[in-house]
Amino acid sequence: MAGSISLLGFALVIFIQIMTQCHSSITTCLPEKHAALFILGDSLFDNGNNNYINTTTSYQANYPPYGETFFKYPSGRFSDGRMIPDAVAELAKLPILPPYLHPGNVEYVYGVNFASGGAGALRETSQGMVIDLKTQVSYLKNVKNLFSQRFGHAIAEEILSKSVYLFNIGANDYGSLLDPNSTSVLLPVDHQGFVDIVIGNLTDAIKEIYNVGGKKFGFLNVPPIGCSPAVRILVNNGSTCFEEFSAIARLHNNALSKRLHELEKQLKGFKYSVMDFYSAFSQVFNNPTKYGFKVASVACCGSGPFRGVDSCGGNKGIKEYELCDNVNEHLFFDSHHLTDRASEYFAELIWNANRTVTSPYNLKQLFEL
């Protein structure tokens, strides 16, 4: 009888070891299919990293009224509340991810956010003021090294291979094509050639992550960048979107789709998801009431026509700004960035939309692979 009990106990221990990856160095036990979420990108994804770098208030959102509706304090997110990755993490049943540069004792096993407001795929984009994409990838390598030290190389590789890497990058790179000496003219450069350079840098980042173990990648393509309040006021007093500018986003999106299809053939085990942010955003912008919004072209916070002057919070050189009464009715919180409610809406599409919006997988399917 004692032998049977002992055998049963041994079998139970083996079962528990199979079902979980528990390590004495942490208090977290990871389910066998545990997938973390790693965030890379710009201000649509930055959840506070720019709080901790040597930059200016133009690249920060750590002052009121940012953050007032959800977190009840300005966390550094360029929104009244959550950003898209916060809502995605919630849908994935993960905790809200910390910014990588947070000085506290941060746990990375569920993922972490490397994004930086103002960042681009090109190192030259807002150089010296932001965390460029290449540096964000280097931070991910630091996390892998930390995992290797704590859990061993094999388990670190396993965690990274099961995890999802979600990108939003490119819009700021194309912002550098706006002629600073003419409010409505793009610089006379080869737009397709410039797009190819951006896509090339993004490809390098993808391959670096793949080479350290990443297999599952999610992307938002670039939205119609000519339709933000900040850009609209540059042309025709904001009466129309800046179509020539949005056309560059379309060049980017076509090149991105082509490159990801190529990478799927070249890299063994590479899987990806692209949410057609351009089309999804355009649909809400052109018919906001259909999607539960009332105001698409006017920001909640800012000044000037369409509140397109980037003065929200009064810390960017212009003290005066207006703040709307009902932020949930708006698509834009400030002159560039989404409201909490809009972020939640687009996160749902990233997570669970059909192939007409998010393909070839949605993010939920990527997590389950």
Image: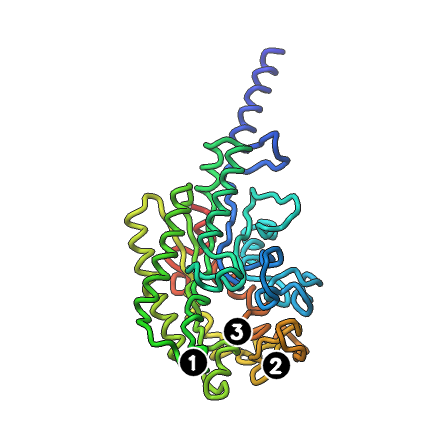
- The circle on residue 324 is none
Would residue 233 appear left or right of 214 to someone viewing this image? right
Q: Nearer the viewer, residue 98 or 55?
A: 55
How far apart marks 3 and 1 lie (CA) works out to 23 Å
Discs 2, 1 touching: Cβ within 8 Å: no
Residue under label 3? 291
Q: Nearer the viewer, mark 3 or mark 1?
A: 1
- The circle on residue 242 is 1
Residue 113 in the image: state x and y as whole percent.
Answer: 55, 52
Tell me what residue is drawn at x 39 percent, y 61 percent: 355
Would residue 167 appear left or right of 72 to someone viewing this image? left
Residue under label 2? 303
Residue 122 in the image: state x and y as whole percent.
Answer: 41, 60
Numbered disc 3: secondary structure: helix
Discs 3, 2 touching: Cβ within 8 Å: no
* Three-letter residue code for mark 2: Ser
Residue 48 higher or lower than 148, as above or below: below
Residue 342 in the image: state x and y as whole percent.
Answer: 55, 68
Packing grade of label 2 (10 A; few <14, some 14-19, many >=20) is: many
Residue 301: in sight, yes or no? no
Numbered disc 1: secondary structure: loop
